Image (cartoon, rainbow, N blue to C red):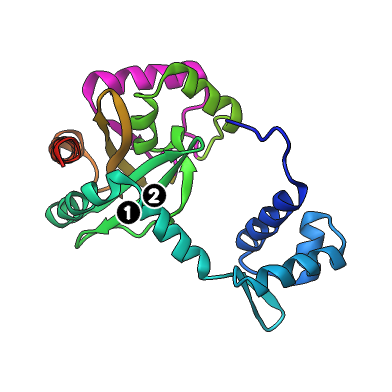
Amino acid sequence: MSQARNPVGATETTFAIIEAIDELDGCGVTDLADHLGMPKSTVHNYLSTLEQEEYIHKEEASYQVGIKFLDIGASARRRLPIYEVAKPEVNKLAEETGELANLLIEDHGKGVYVHQARGEQAVQVDSSVGARVDLHATAFGKAILAHLPVSRVDDIIEHHGLPQRTERTVGTREELETVLDEIRERGYAVDDQERLEGLRCVAAPILTDSRVLGAVSLSGPGNRMQGDYFEEELPMRLLETVNVIELNFTYS
């Protein structure tokens, strides 16, 4: 991961405050100061400025992340070439399978959901557009890792580690490489309750000119995601969808 040579302390503090407000799901000045180990007066000055610029808002005594971030995030997503191309195909995949379909990209070593589509029997999970997840603990993340340069994979692991989300999560570099070899051989990845207990996923990478642009996945409960449905039918549908996306991206 790249590091700023001369980081601006005030900027780092500003984003630390914003991220803390989000992590705490809203908070007051005292709780935020305690959480960050900063003087209340300093925190209050930052909060006042952020509120003035409409990046946060105050509800009674609690500060919340402002809706302005949604506008900025939506603008960033529109600038992703793969988003507009993949979106209709992900929607179609969800409608035809009835499951939860996701489009994810890699950003700063994390996986980021950029689009979700819900079929009639889609499972409710903790993910949403904009959420960031560990690549090694998800099917779509492993599908992406399998097609990144080895040096890039090593860099991601060095920066983010391999945190265990469940007892099934890949825990070592050697184990991960074995899994990535299998993904490259068969063309898709699986997540057998590696991020969330009870959730299984299958995912395929979006590739063009030997580059991985992202991945598409289908997620569902373990009691439904099994047998030929999970091992053959869904992977086939995914690979078909990804092939269409790749062709449309290449020739659009």
Above or below, 244 relative to 74? above
Q: Amino acid at mark 2?
A: Tyr
Instruction: Report the quarter where the C terminus lies.
Output: top left
Residue annotated with mark 1: 115
Q: Residues within 10 Å of mark 2 (few under 14, many from 20)?
A: many
Span shown in magenta: 166-195
Task: Report if the CB atoms under discs 2 and 1 are less than 8 Å apart.
Answer: yes
Residue beneath the point at 67% across and 35% down: 4
In the picture provided, is 130 more to the left or to the right than 64?
left
Q: CA distance from mark 2 to mark 1?
A: 6 Å
Above or below, 195 relative to 117? above
Residue 100 in which image quadrant: bottom left
- What is the secondary structure assignment of the residue under circle 1? strand
Residue beneath the point at 84% across and 63% down: 42
Residue 125 in which image quadrant: bottom left
Residue 5 in which image quadrant: top right
Q: Nearer the viewer, residue 152 or 51?
A: 51
Residue annotated with mark 2: 113
Residue 211 placement (x, y as % from top left) = 31, 27
Instruction: Report the quarter where the N terminus lies.
Output: top right
Magenta-span inclusion, residue 178? yes
Q: Amino acid at mark 1?
A: His
Examine the rendering and report whether any part of residue 26 can be seen. Answer: yes
In the picture provided, is 63 more to the left or to the right than 120?
right
Q: Nearer the viewer, residue 63 or 220?
A: 63
